[in-house]
Amino acid sequence: MKALVIGATGSTGEFLVDELLADAAYTSVTVFVRRSIGKQHPKLTEQIIDFSNIHSYKDLIVGDVFFSCLGTTLKAAGSKENQIKIDFDIPATFAKLAKENGIKSFVLLSAYGASAQSKVFYSQIKGKLEDKIEELGFRQYIIFKPGLLSRVGTDRFGEKIMDNLLRTVNAIGLFRKFKPLPTELLAEKLAKAPKVLPIGISIIKLEEIFSL
């Protein structure tokens, strides 16, 4: 299979690229990035592009499985408008072009609680993206909805606090389905999903990710 990835410089996307490169089922891995990810591998192709003009790269969006791990925080984006561009506009545009180019499988890294009807801004964006991609009618559409992610070396203060808190209550048997998910493990499950899940729509939530 030929894999394509956006979000390859993020904490999950970086591990996903490593998983895909190590997996014999994937014959090539193409990443679309603003800057080089600094990896060298015979199977890897970097496409350094202008994300404000994605349509001009349509001919490069060819393969079998498209992985979208792109996302940011409001703090990092600087404004709601910029976050919408990153979390909705860019992946939605890639998905449309991927479908037009005949890509059969789309794997979306979304979030727990994502819903177009949510009153929470972040959850609403993610939910709208899920719905937009579903409308495209991919043969296989896989949505991952993890909870708190455990990122190596995270600088997100709130994330650190919640990670430590959940680990503590998990140790005494509470809230185990909400246990932090290491991004390395999430990446492994993302790479595995298109190989083991059926055609149609699959939604993988929280504790289901651990058992995939």
Image (cartoon, grey):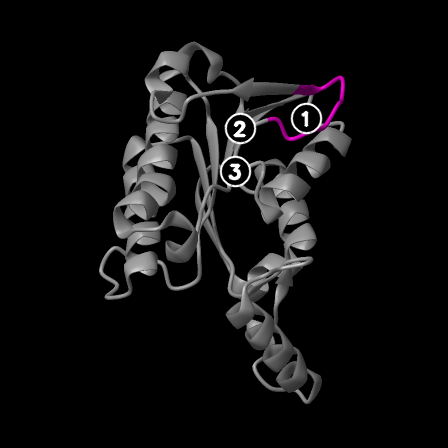
Residue 26 got which mark?
1
Q: Residue furthest top?
A: 59
Magenta range is: 36-44
> Is 91 a magenta residue?
no
Estimate the spatial distance between the alpha carbons at disc 3 and disc 1, rounded to whole Å.
18 Å
**Rendered view: 97 above or below 121:** above
Estimate the spatial distance between the alpha carbons at disc 2 and disc 1, rounded to whole Å.
9 Å
Whether residue 6 sits left or right of residue 185 in the image: it is: left
Residue highlighted by disc 2: 65
Which image quarter is the C terminus in? bottom right
Q: Identify residue type, mark 1.
A: Tyr
Q: Nearer the viewer, residue 145 or 54?
A: 54
Residue highlighted by disc 3: 7
Helix or strand or loop: what does disc 2 sit on? strand
- Say whether marks 2 and 1 touch (CB < 8 Å): yes
> Would you call the spot at circle 3 few (<14 residues within 10 Å), some (14-19), or many (20 or more)?
many
x%, y% of residue 135?
27, 36
Whether residue 128 sits left or right of residue 45 in the image: it is: left
**Rendered view: 194 above or below 41:** below
x%, y% of residue 107?
49, 39
Residue 112 got which mark?
none
Whether residue 7 sits left or right of residue 118 in the image: it is: right
Q: Earlier in the sequence, mark 3 or mark 1?
A: 3
> Would you call the spot at circle 1 few (<14 residues within 10 Å), some (14-19), or many (20 or more)?
some
Helix or strand or loop: what does disc 3 sit on? loop
The residue lying at 69 percent from left, 29 percent from top is 38
Q: Earlier in the sequence, mark 3 or mark 2?
A: 3
Q: Identify residue type, mark 2.
A: Val
Q: Identify residue type, mark 3.
A: Gly
